[in-house]
Amino acid sequence: MTWLIWRQHRTEVCVLGLLVGMFGIALLVLGTGAHDLFPDGPARCAGEAGINEACAASFRRLDEEYGYVENLLAAFYLVPVVIGAFLGAPLLARELEDGTWQLAWTQAVPRMRWLAAKLAALAGVTVALTGMFTAVLTWFRQPFDAWEGRFQYDAFDLEGLVPMAYALFAFGVATAAGAILRRSLPAFGVAFGAFLAARMSVALLARPAYATPLTTMEPVPVGGSKDQAGHRPVSSFAGWMIEHGYADATGRRLSWTEYYELEGAANRAGTNLNQFLHARGIQQFEVYHPADRFWTFQLIEAALFVAAAAVLIGVVVWRVRRRMI
Amino acid sequence: MTATEFALRTDGVGKRYRKGWALRDCTLALPAGGVIALVGPNGAGKTTLLRLVVGLLAPSTGTVEVLGHDVTASTPQTLSRVGFLAQDHPLYKRFTVAEMLRFGRACNLRFDQGLAERRLAKLGIPLDRRAGTLSGGQQAQVALALALAKRPDLLVLDEPVASLDPLARHEFLQVLMGAVAEGGVTVLFSSHVVHELERVCDHLVVLNHGRVTLTGDIDTLLAEHRLLVGPRTATDLDRAGAVVEAVHSDRHTTLLVRDGAIPTAPGWQAQPIALEDLVLAYLRRPSEPRAAVTSGVAA
């Protein structure tokens, strides 16, 4: 079976391996330059950025010289679906398209053993390729993460455990769609669509609710300009801001209309906005997930997608076992 | 007969797809040894029946027993006793012929690589060619060599020659019959072409509208049936339920009867019937539910 699986799927595996290798090497080369900006390591520098001018300069240079790569990397959220769907779609669909399922399942290897070997091998390749890519990408992003935290969409979705879970999910959708549609290309399309839909709805709707967000509420400081008043405490800087705004003295959150009315009133009165707000007991609040929830959130989201993948693979196994194909 | 002397036994087998029943009430007992033809028009349910026999499909009703084993409990041992050649003889098109043989070796218990190589060498099919670049006839031969190298006890072929040109068809049947002559293998194949069957087959199953309409040993069937030609008449047609078909011309009535050889009525002439005409007569019959007409092997 090992030889057969390799022979049948070596093209996909080689093409994907080559792509991952090429992007990996490019990131390693670029990443070495970015890491060299921080002789003492980016994490340490991020802690000193406020006081250490060299560190602040390093981060400015990082943004100027490598910021475009970081922006490009955001598109790499598609890597898991490309890997998973590319390996999953033909698993059954190609056999059904070419009629070779009748050849494969009338040899002496029982179909469930055939299916188990194929699923294990290709899911394994899916996880391994995605894992290698994620490892390189995570390393590349270290300086950026030190500065921006790992909770933003361009970090959380590309690092840690979730890319592997996304890839498995794409693999599951593509395999199941291939078994039902009996065509590789439509199965690939379905996997792509399902991946985008699932990823977007989970990231936007489910992820913020994995835990109850924390809320800080503090009076508007008297001194300083408006800009300084807007500065965020360090605790939430690397965390994930869900919502922020102003509340009145009783803690009732103000709508932005109410806030703009206050701002207009301050302008008409000709007083400093912060003093004006402070005098009225206005507070500023932030709702956020702290940075140390990163791994908890990663685990929850990975479990969600792995569970979905398991259900889809279960459908495939059930169909093949019932000889519905 | 004991169970193992049957190559295939089905009991009340039916298969329903979403569109409806493809096969109903199929009860068969086919003897081991020799060549069994499964005949019927396109859409009669032949492919469905063959896929049930090799375990590619599970029946919606009834049981299928191949070589004494229930096919739904497929183990490597039972699977290796049955060879299957699907319609249009699918192969992995990107594999070379040698890789197809390696596939057969990797996936079977008693694969005879030497046998397959000898067969292909005799046919002049190079091992280093990709399967997809071979002609249709050569692809069929590679698929047949693969199936035969399994050394199966039952070889099932779905319309094996339907897509082949006359020459390739002849070559294919020659190889197949050669393998049968070497002994040990029961062949079950489907066809919608009726002529030439007599030469090749020992046993016949006629399938129409998803039902078995006739099954039996070919010699016995031919001995039991005959044509009676007499003056045109509309009465006295049902000779004890033995009339299979009645055809009236201006002056004559021709009856196909299945009555053994009881004496003919005065004014009537008896004639033997050719196998092709016999099959066509059964295929022309309306598709109402009717118990299969069995003969030959006692069910």
Image: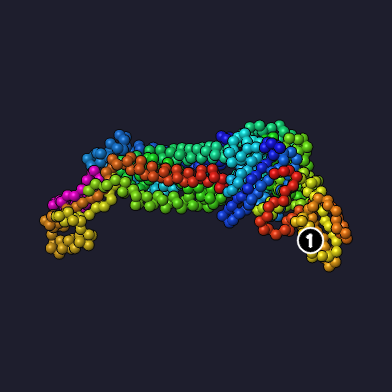
Quarter of the rendering occupied by the N terminus of chain B: top right
Q: Is residue A114 magenta?
A: no
Picture quadrant where residue A234 is located: top left
Q: Where is residue A248 in the image (x, y as percent from the top left)?
A: 16, 56
Residue A261: quarter of image? bottom left
Viewer-nearest residue: B70 or A29 = B70
Of residue B141 and residue B265, the one placed in the foreground of this image is B265
| Residue lying at 73% horizontally and 43% vertically, measured from the top left | B297
Q: Can residue A80 be seen in this view?
A: no
At x 49%, y 52%, the residue is: A190
The magenta segment is A216-236
Instruction: Judge from the rendering whether residue B102 lies leftward or rightward of residue A322; answer left or right.
Output: right
Q: In the image, is B68 to the left or to the right of A283?
A: right
Outermost residue to the left = A279
As drawn, which residue projects farthest toward the bottom? B250
* Residue A234 lies within the magenta run: yes
**Direction from residue B222 to residue A144 in the image, left or right:** left
Q: Which residue does the image show at 50% across and 52% down from the upper left?
A: A189
Q: What residue type is labelled 1?
A: Leu
Q: Answer left or right for A278 relative to A39.
A: left
